[in-house]
Image (spheres, rainbow, N blue to C red):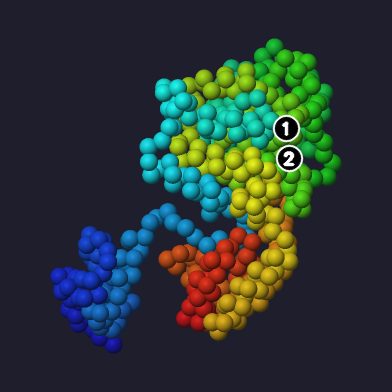
């Protein structure tokens, strides 16, 4: 054990460190190397003075620490990860992955000038919304459409444009809060609307709406409770009955659909998730939903419905504050083209639909393949039958059968294994369940399996 002063005196001067070949030849910005060197040396001094380092460390060892710190500094803060959680719409991990068609479309519009707001045919200023309006009306059956930057913005804009200084009637059982403390009652307050709650938490009848309508009522609002479910003694008013009431009273019916599925998910074993087309057929006047959930596109708030109302919403000053950019429009257009070419094409091209529609026997084979690759590197694992969540606040009570590779580390804790995989240059994010670390293959790409297998081997045996 060396004395503190001896260890401190052994620290090389900064210019000597930077001249070491491992740093002088490092392919990185000089500013990053210098910053990393200063941080490393300062941290080393603190650890020595705190008594945590009791031996002299060579200049070469310090240089290796600097190299690791340079790699951290040079890494983008926002970067890809391997999603091994099995959650297809993981909000923390970016929700829906874009299709290759959509990703290519984004690259195409960001690398060149575009006709974002230019009408090529007529040689004059155009509208950015025209690029997706026709596709949206085609795949949903609605009269008109508008896109903003997310569904929270869509709800905000709709209420501001259609119900300012008036009453909006909504069932108590539908006054939801979504991520980030976005609450329907508080949004109404921000929009200058007056919320009129009807019914009870578990039961709302048509007569509740009828009795609540006054001369100050501006709209009837229905909210799909996509992030929670009330079961048991429950009842709610159907869209058809609400629309009929709205027609009788001359009031528009607004629906916040949330996840916004364009395909019937019953075929995937996912029940009670409404489709956008069903709401259009029911005659709902204005419908909003997300672009990056079950639709499988970019973050966007999609507003569709009757032209007379969409035109009102489009003209509202708030629309400019929540408008979408060219990258979102490019990705959304490409995603919608997959739907326009037919449901089978959409299921083939759009990742979230492929993930949700994956067959159990295919997931088993995929997990066995990953397990074989891990075992070939001398690491024990087993394939387990598990369940995945859909995520993104969609169908919260339903789980999908799946298979995962289970890891039980012997040289570290399960939490330690999770950290080692998470802190890699390309992070791997799995989940811990019943004391084991799981790699759920539903959300993993086979092109990453070799990397994951090597990472698991290093983490388990290192």
The reply to whether residue 375 is in sight is yes
In whole angstroms, how far apart are the C-alphas of marks 1 and 2? Answer: 8 Å
Count of numbered badges drawn on the protein: 2
Label 1: few (<14), some or many (≥20) within 10 Å? Answer: many
Which mark, residue 274?
2
Q: Name the residue located 43 percent from the left edge and 41 percent from the top edge.
A: 109
Q: Where is residue 352 in the image (x, y as percent from the top left)?
A: 62, 52
Question: Residue 25 is drawn in which quadrant?
Answer: bottom left
Residue 199 screen position, x and y as percent: 77, 30
Q: Which residue is drawn at 33% across and 61% down?
A: 73
- In the image as oriented, which residue stretches furthest toward the front? 121
Specify whether 364 is left or right of 407. right
- Give the answer, above or below, for where 6 lies relative to 132: below
Q: Which residue lies furthest to the bottom in this view?
A: 1
- The answer to which quarter of the image holds residue 157 is top right
Q: Which residue is drawn at 60% across and 73% down?
A: 370
Picture residue at 80% right of the left edge, 45% below the top: 231
Side of 193 relative to 11 (left or right): right
Question: Secondary structure under badge 1?
Answer: helix
Labels 1 and 2 touching (C-beta < 8 A): yes
Any mark on residue 132, and which?
A: none
Residue that mark 1 sits on: 279
Task: Report x, y in % for residue 158.
Answer: 59, 26
Q: Can residue 156 be seen in this view?
A: no
The residue positioned farthest toward the right in the image shown = 233
The tag earlier along the polypeptide, 1 or 2, is: 2
Where, quadrant-wise, is the N terminus in this rendering? bottom left
| Neighbour tally class for label 2: few under 14, some 14-19, many 20 plus, Cα within 10 Å | some
Helix, strand or loop for disc 2: loop
Tell whether 207 sits left or right of 84: right
């Amino acid at each position: 054990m060396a004395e503190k002063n001896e260890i401190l005196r052994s620290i090389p001067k900064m210019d000597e460190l930077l001249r070491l070949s491992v740093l002088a030849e490092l392919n990185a910005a000089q500013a990053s190397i210098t910053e990393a060197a200063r941080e490393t040396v300062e941290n080393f001094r603190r650890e020595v003075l705190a008594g945590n380092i009791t031996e002299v460390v060579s200049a070469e060892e310090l240089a290796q620490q600097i190299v690791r710190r340079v790699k951290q500094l040079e890494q983008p803060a926002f970067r890809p990860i391997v999603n091994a959680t099995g959650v297809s719409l993981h909000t923390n991990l970016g929700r829906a992955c874009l299709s290759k068609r959509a990703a290519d479309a984004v690259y195409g519009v960001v690398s060149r000038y575009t006709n974002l707001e230019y009408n090529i045919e007529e040689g004059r200023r155009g509208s950015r919304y025209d690029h997706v309006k026709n596709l949206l009306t085609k795949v949903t059956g609605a009269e008109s459409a508008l896109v903003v930057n997310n569904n929270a913005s869509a709800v905000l804009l709709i209420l501001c444009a259609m119900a300012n200084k008036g009453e909006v009637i909504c069932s108590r059982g539908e006054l939801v809060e979504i991520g980030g403390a976005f609450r329907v009652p508080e949004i109404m307050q921000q929009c200058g609307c007056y919320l009129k709650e009807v019914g009870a938490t578990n039961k709302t009848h048509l007569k509740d709406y009828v009795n609540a309508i006054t001369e100050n009522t501006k709209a009837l609002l229905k909210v799909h409770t996509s992030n929670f479910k009330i079961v048991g003694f429950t009842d709610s008013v159907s869209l058809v009955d609400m629309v009929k009431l709205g027609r009788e009273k001359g009031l528009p019916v607004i629906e916040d659909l949330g996840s916004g599925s364009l395909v019937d998910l019953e075929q995937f074993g996912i029940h009670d998730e409404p489709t956008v087309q069903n709401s259009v057929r029911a005659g709902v006047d204005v419908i909003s939903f997300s672009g990056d959930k079950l639709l499988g596109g970019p973050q966007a708030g999609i507003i569709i419905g009757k032209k007379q109302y969409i035109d009102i919403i489009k003209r509202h000053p708030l629309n400019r504050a929540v408008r979408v950019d060219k990258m979102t429009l490019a990705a959304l257009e490409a995603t919608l083209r997959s739907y326009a070419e037919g449901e089978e094409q959409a299921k083939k091209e759009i990742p979230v639909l492929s993930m949700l529609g994956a067959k159990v026997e295919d997931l088993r084979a995929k997990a066995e393949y990953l397990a074989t690759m891990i075992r070939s590197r001398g690491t024990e694992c087993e394939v387990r039958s598990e369940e995945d969540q859909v995520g993104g606040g969609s169908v919260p009570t339903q789980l999908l059968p799946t298979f995962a590779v289970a890891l039980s580390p012997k040289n570290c804790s399960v939490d330690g294994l999770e950290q080692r995989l998470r802190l890699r240059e390309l992070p791997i994010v799995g989940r811990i369940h019943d004391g084991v670390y799981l790699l759920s293959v539903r959300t993993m790409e086979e092109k990453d399996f070799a990397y994951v297998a090597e990472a698991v081997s290093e983490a388990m045996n290192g």
